[in-house]
Image (spheres, rainbow, N blue to C red):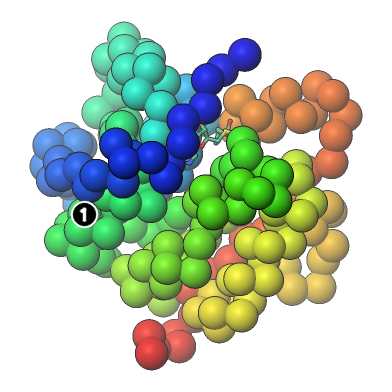
Amino acid sequence: MRQHVNPLSHFFQLEKDLPEIPELFENIDLPIHLDIGCGRGHFLLEMAASNSQWNFLGLEIRESLVVGAEKDRVKLGLNNVSFLFCNANVSLKNWLRNFGKNKVKRVSIQFPDPWFKQRHRKRRVLTPSFLFLLAANLDTGSELFIQSDVQSIMSEMTSLIDLSKYFNSKFPDSKLSTISNPFPILTEREKYVKSKGLMVYRQLYYRNNNDIK
Ligand SMILES: C[S@@+](CC[C@H](N)C(=O)[O-])C[C@H]1O[C@@H](n2cnc3c(N)ncnc32)[C@H](O)[C@@H]1O
């Protein structure tokens, strides 16, 4: 049983300085795929191994998972993926403003919230301000991919994204449960959910050209 942390605790509300792009990747000219709440990093490690034309950056609030993912990265000799320990809701803002604009071309938020009870709602990753931050730092056409096995969380995320008017769905007419994964690699949670025969809800968006207001 993995221990969760409380992202609202004082420690996790302190902003961390995240490294600049040249410290993260060998080829700094490649587009970046940002995975928020990357867990143990298996998804990104496999994506990086099979996609040399992208850089991959995983953010994770549980330090031990980041340490493990970094060890694997070194073992595999991958220079187009990095893992950072931080509370994405707190520490991504400055990094995106300083380095990420026009660089991050894809964001994924996959099975984001281990705390899906209503009373833990304030801990959610995709808050209005976090979505606004992404919208403000993604170019037109950049992608936002979300998936979850918890229907209520998925419908909160899709309602928020639709209300924002900054993203359009690539599959506006499909039921969320019928949209297939655009990536060939399953995340750790996705493998578990699949092994239990549970439903996965997904949506793929692209940043439209609505100006930030
Ligand atoms: C249910 S797990 C899913 C992990 C992975 N995405 C997957 O699909 O296997 C959710 C992950 O998000 C991380 N997480 C939750 N809130 C976060 C935050 N504010 N910043 C960074 N990571 C966060 C958790 O620690 C956890 O590892």
Q: Amino acid at mark 1?
A: Trp
**Quarter placement of the N terminus:** top right
Nearer to the camera, 5 or 125 = 5
How far from the left and from the top, in percent, is residue 95? 21, 54
Residue 131: image x %, image y %? 46, 66
What residue sits 84% from the left and 24% below the top?
196
| Quarter location, residue 107 | bottom left
Q: Secondary structure at mark 1?
A: helix
Indicate the position of residue 85 as horizontal and vertical percent values.
31, 32
Image-quadrant location for residue 134: bottom left
Q: Residue furthest top?
A: 75
Could you tell whether 132 is left or right of 127 in the image? Answer: left
Q: Please say whether residue 85 is visible from this viewpoint.
A: yes
Give the side of residue 150 with respect to residue 109, left or right.
Answer: right
The residue that appears at 62% across and 39% down in the rendered structure is 115
What residue is disc 1 on?
A: 95
* Residue 49 appears in view: no
